[in-house]
């Protein structure tokens, strides 16, 4: 194995060998940020302050971290109405198209209740019940994310959640409100409970709730939620991790990731553009090309340099593409490329190969798979119909992206009558005695004698 270190996307070369899974795993580009003690300690302090002092603490942290002290934590309905009324028509049209497609997809995979029959008078039903109240987080920071409003709200609505609260940081425009496009998206979706708060303090407010505080612009209490979803920075992720014993969470998300499996026939311009598209999110974003073609490695260099120089957030993109979390893995064949992709478990995985469907069929670990060169991640971010809140940091090996079932609980209902119980009573008796829990068996036997 030999390594090169170009200015953008360093190359790890396995083209002359057949590495083991361990060797591939060790070669995967990952961001190493230490033990996270700094963020954890800071977040613990924020959570304690919000729990103790409520809305006033949220306002203070907003001023410190977001540069804006919102005079009204609860966004007034008139601000929502105005945001939608003044939304640029083309943005509204795009949001409406995104919502429509997301709703079709979310509705299609809502599970149905299923009953299993075990004989006369004996059945068990799996019933899907929506979480009663959820808190949806929409980040601010380096970009504005009305698409995240869509991705969070639509599956919650299709699951049947009856109470939805949304939080987003106040914009740095002096208004003390979230960005107007965020508000317009929420209004378009019928979300009326929106809060101007971000970061770890927002997650704490959702988990603990906030008492009414007129001075903090909270005319009525923010009731605690049962589940918090949505992406965020490392402080948001840390808060979700610390609070998951108090409130349910979707995931502790890390920076965004894109991996691309590409062969010699891939279009270098497309590959470069797609790597850059995710790198512009964050200096810590990961961009990873896996290929069996040394020619493609060289061919993609020119488009990368040219497109990075031309893109609006060039400095941010270059930082991401030169970071330890980004790189190129050159392998001997597509079989090895597929192994590497499954070991990496990318948030977003694109496939640019001669037979992308055949490759996609062998992918088992990824948040979302984008099949073919005309299915870029950007499509999934906005308008494919899929959800863009996806597992990061390799958790795609066991976790799923946000979907309708995220907002549902599976409740089992057991219905046995006298005859049904009689048919299985002896097995309960034997197993309860085997576990030295005889009262369990007695609770069945008493029903056979009375």
Image (tube, rainbow, N blue to C red):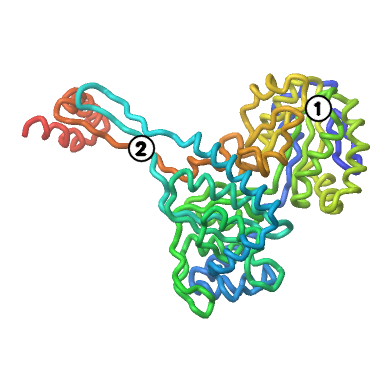
Image x and y of residue 34, in percent: 70, 52
Residue at image point 35% right, 34% down = 126
Local secondary structure at mark 2: strand
Against 446, residue 319 (above or below) is below
Residue at image point 77% right, 40% down = 287
Screen quadrant of the N terminus? top right
Residue 207 shown left or right of residue 114 in the figure: right
Image x and y of residue 282, in percent: 75, 52
Against 282, residue 198 (above or below) is below
Q: Is residue 41 visible?
A: no
Hey, which residue is sitting farthest left in the picture?
450
Judged by depth in the image, the label closer to the viewer, 2 or 1, is 2
Residue at image point 65% right, 52% down = 92
Image x and y of residue 389, in percent: 61, 45
Specify the label residue 127 is tagged with: 2
Snapshot quadrant of residue 331: top right
Residue at image point 63% right, 58% down = 182
Local crowd size for mark 1, using a 10 Å CA cut-off: few (<14), some (14–19), many (≥20): many
Local secondary structure at mark 1: strand
| Residue at mark 1 | 291
Q: How many marks?
A: 2
- N-terminal label among 2 and 1: 2
Label 2 – label 1 distance at C-alpha: 45 Å
Snapshot quadrant of residue 448: top left
Against 47, residue 147 (above or below) is above
């Amino acid at each position: 194995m030999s390594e090169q270190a170009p200015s953008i996307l360093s190359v790890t070369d396995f083209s002359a060998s057949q590495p083991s899974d361990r060797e591939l795993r060790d070669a995967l580009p990952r961001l190493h940020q230490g033990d996270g003690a700094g963020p954890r300690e800071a977040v613990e302090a924020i959570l304690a302050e919000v729990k103790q002092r409520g809305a006033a603490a949220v306002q203070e942290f907003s001023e410190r971290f977001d540069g804006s002290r919102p005079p009204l934590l609860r966004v007034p309905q008139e601000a929502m109405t105005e945001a939608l009324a003044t939304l640029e028509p083309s943005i509204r049209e795009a949001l409406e198209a995104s919502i429509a497609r997301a709703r079709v997809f979310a509705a299609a995979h809502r599970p149905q209740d299923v009953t299993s029959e075990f004989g006369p008078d004996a059945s068990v039903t799996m019933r899907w019940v929506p979480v009663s109240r959820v808190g949806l987080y929409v980040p601010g920071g380096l970009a504005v994310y009305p698409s995240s409003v869509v991705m969070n709200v639509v599956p919650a609505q299709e699951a049947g959640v009856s109470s939805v609260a949304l939080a987003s940081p106040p914009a740095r425009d002096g208004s003390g409100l979230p960005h107007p496009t965020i508000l317009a998206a929420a209004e378009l979706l019928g979300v009326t409970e929106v809060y101007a708060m971000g970061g770890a303090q927002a997650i704490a407010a959702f988990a603990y709730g906030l008492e009414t505080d007129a001075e903090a612009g909270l005319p009525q209490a923010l009731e605690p939620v049962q589940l918090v979803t949505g992406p965020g920075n490392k402080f948001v992720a840390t808060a979700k991790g610390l609070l998951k014993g108090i409130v349910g969470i979707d995931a502790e998300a890390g920076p965004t990731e894109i991996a691309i499996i590409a062969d010699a026939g891939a279009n270098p311009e497309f590959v470069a553009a797609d790597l850059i598209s995710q790198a512009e999110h964050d200096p810590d974003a990961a961009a990873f090309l896996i290929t069996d073609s040394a020619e493609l490695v060289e061919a993609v260099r020119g488009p990368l340099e040219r497109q990075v120089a031309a893109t609006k957030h060039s400095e941010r993109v270059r930082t991401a593409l030169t970071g330890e979390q980004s790189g190129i893995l050159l392998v001997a064949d597509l079989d090895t490329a597929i192994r590497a992709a499954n070991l990496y478990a990318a948030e977003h995985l694109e496939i640019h190969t001669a037979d992308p469907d055949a490759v996609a069929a062998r992918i088992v670990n990824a948040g979302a798979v984008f099949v073919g060169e005309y299915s870029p991640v950007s499509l999934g971010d906005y308008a494919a119909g899929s959800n863009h809140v996806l597992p990061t940091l390799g958790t795609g090996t066991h976790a799923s992206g946000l979907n309708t079932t995220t907002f549902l609980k599976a409740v089992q209902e057991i219905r046995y009558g006298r005859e049904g119980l009689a048919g299985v009573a002896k097995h309960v008796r034997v197993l309860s005695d085997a576990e030295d829990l005889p009262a369990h068996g007695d609770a069945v036997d008493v029903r056979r004698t009375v």
